[in-house]
Image: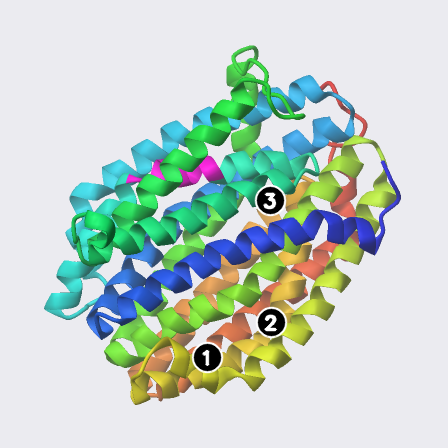
């Protein structure tokens, strides 16, 4: 393994960062297109995206097992076993994605109903979410395919899947929404249909290239040791998956509290999070880099390198997040006015933006430290931290605030409480160094 340096971290991180920004820009573009149809359409898309993010986040948590095992064996020089775990992950995600997303379709009315939208927004949300769920398996396969390549230090292949997939999704989605080039005019549902078709075609092409051996990282037969290897993926990834499920569930409850204040705060929250997500993806990218570097160094038996990789990644992330928060705060009003022409929504967006800007440095610490722990296979502690924080800052405190009749501004402040608590606890765990001696990862390349 090469010594850890800021330059090495950036080489691994910048393609991931650009990839994540492309996905966030796609979400912003979808909301921008929906914004031309009014607040009900924005609320519907916000609801559909939030419900999909529950599934996406759960599966991304499960990807922790893929990152840890593929990165571990790649760092140990066992490319065959790394390719075997990658191929196994693709199969698992395709099957699980089909089961979880398509089983949810009969219950869309109930799922959308928990947000308490107006009747028009409710109907639009059901239609939009139906098509999103139908094409969700392709998006989940894209997720694990990209994560497998990042685990070996190749972040440029995922960049290409993101660039092609996101660009074609927006173009084809808009074309089906407005009926461009002779295509049917499907309205709001066209955004989900067009994006789904574009993403499915994109990942089908890339997986085919990979299966044919046209990439430097080759897949291997996943069936030898299928049950044992699958169990190892689940053992590592399940706590992180449960963590994300609980987090998303807590966020849905929080948004129900928020919806009680009316459509304007709800729409502002959806748009504001999408805009801020362009900055938050910086933390997510560094989290992935931290997990990759830590898993590879542990696979090579380099404990000092693993610790240095996590610590240096965190510092680099925080510096960048500080700069990003200042920039975002300075242009808060201009960004809000660009996204929607509604004075009430704009006012709520500005308040939310300022609060989340204070949260960004804490997000940087929390994401990168948790990423390092997950890369070492320590997924249970971040899970417990997230559960505790969500119960306190996204359920109990908001419930009290709503019962008190507090202004919606104070609900927004719970984001700062959430990330400051998680960052402190994950930093403490990382500094204790117990995760360095996980027996499944230290000098056990053939285990």
For the point 31% across and 32% down, the residue is 99
| Circles 2 and 3: CB atoms closer than 8 Å | no
Q: CA distance from mark 2 to mark 1?
A: 17 Å
Residue 439 in which image quadrant: top right
Pick whichever of labels 2 and 3 is earlier in the sequence.
2
Q: Is residue 100 left or right of residue 230?
A: left
| Circles 3 and 1: CB atoms closer than 8 Å | no
- Closer to the camera in the image, 8 or 266: 8
Observer able to see residue 116 = yes
Percent coordinates x, y for residue 48 in the rendering:
28, 56
Q: CA distance from mark 2 to mark 3?
A: 23 Å
Q: Measured along the vertical axis of the image, is residue 172 above or below residue 125?
A: above
Q: Secondary structure at mark 3?
A: loop
Foreground mark, 2 or 1? 1
- Closer to the camera in the image, 122 or 234: 122
Pick whichever of labels 2 and 1 is earlier in the sequence.
1
The magenta region covers 135-142
- Closer to the camera in the image, 337 or 438: 337
Q: Secondary structure at mark 1?
A: helix
Q: Is residue 270 left or right of residue 280?
A: left
Residue named by callout 2? 360
Q: Measured along the vertical axis of the image, is residue 90 above or below residue 183?
A: above
Q: Which mark is residue 379?
A: 3
For the point 24% across and 37% down, the residue is 103
Residue named by callout 1? 335
Helix, strand or loop: magenta stretch: helix
Q: Secondary structure at mark 2?
A: helix
- Closer to the camera in the image, 163 or 76: 163
Observer able to see residue 64 = no
Task: Residue at the far top: name it.
Answer: 224
Pick whichever of labels 3 and 1 is earlier in the sequence.
1
For the point 31% across and 83% down, the residue is 341
């Amino acid at each position: 393994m090469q010594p850890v340096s800021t330059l090495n971290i950036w080489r691994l991180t910048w393609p991931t960062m650009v990839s994540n920004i492309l996905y966030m820009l796609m979400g912003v573009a979808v909301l921008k297109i929906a914004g031309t149809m009014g607040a009900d359409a924005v609320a519907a898309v916000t609801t559909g995206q939030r419900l999909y993010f529950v599934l996406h986040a759960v599966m991304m948590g499960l990807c922790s097992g893929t990152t840890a095992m593929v990165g571990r064996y790649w760092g140990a020089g066992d490319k065959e076993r790394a390719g075997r775990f990658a191929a196994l992950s693709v199969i698992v995600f395709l099957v699980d994605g089909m089961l979880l997303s398509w089983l949810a379709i009969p219950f869309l009315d109930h799922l959308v109903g928990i947000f308490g939208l107006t009747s028009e927004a409710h109907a639009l949300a059901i239609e939009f979410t139906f098509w999103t769920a139908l094409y969700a398996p392709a998006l989940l396969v894209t997720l694990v395919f990209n994560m497998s390549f990042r685990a070996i230090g190749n972040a440029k292949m995922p960049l290409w899947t993101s660039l092609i997939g996101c660009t074609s999704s927006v173009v084809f989605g808009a074309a089906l929404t407005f009926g461009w080039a002779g295509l049917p005019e499907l309205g709001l549902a066209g955004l989900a249909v067009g994006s789904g078709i574009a993403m499915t075609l994109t990942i089908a092409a890339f997986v085919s290239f990979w299966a044919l051996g046209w990439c430097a990282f080759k897949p291997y037969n996943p069936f030898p040791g299928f049950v044992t290897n699958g169990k190892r993926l689940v053992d590592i990834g399940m706590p992180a998956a449960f963590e994300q499920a609980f987090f998303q569930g807590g966020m849905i409850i929080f948004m129900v509290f928020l919806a009680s204040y009316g459509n304007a705060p709800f729409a502002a929250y959806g748009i504001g999070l999408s805009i801020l997500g362009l900055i938050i993806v910086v933390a997510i990218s560094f989290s992935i880099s931290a997990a990759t570097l830590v898993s590879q160094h542990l696979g090579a038996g380099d404990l000092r390198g693993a610790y240095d990789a996590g610590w240096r990644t965190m510092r680099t992330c925080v510096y960048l997040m500080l700069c990003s928060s200042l920039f975002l705060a300075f242009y808060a009003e201009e960004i809000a006015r660009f996204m929607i022409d509604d004075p009430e929504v704009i006012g709520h967006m500005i308040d939310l933006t300022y609060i989340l800007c204070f949260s960004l440095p804490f997000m940087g610490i929390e994401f990168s430290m948790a990423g390092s722990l997950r890369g070492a296979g320590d997924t249970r502690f971040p899970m417990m931290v997230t559960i505790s924080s969500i119960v306190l800052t996204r359920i109990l405190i908001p419930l009290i605030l709503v019962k008190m009749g507090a202004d919606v501004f104070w609900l927004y402040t719970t984001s700062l409480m959430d990330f400051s608590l998680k960052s402190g606890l994950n930093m403490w765990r990382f500094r204790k160094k117990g995760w360095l001696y996980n027996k499944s990862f230290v000098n056990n390349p053939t285990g």
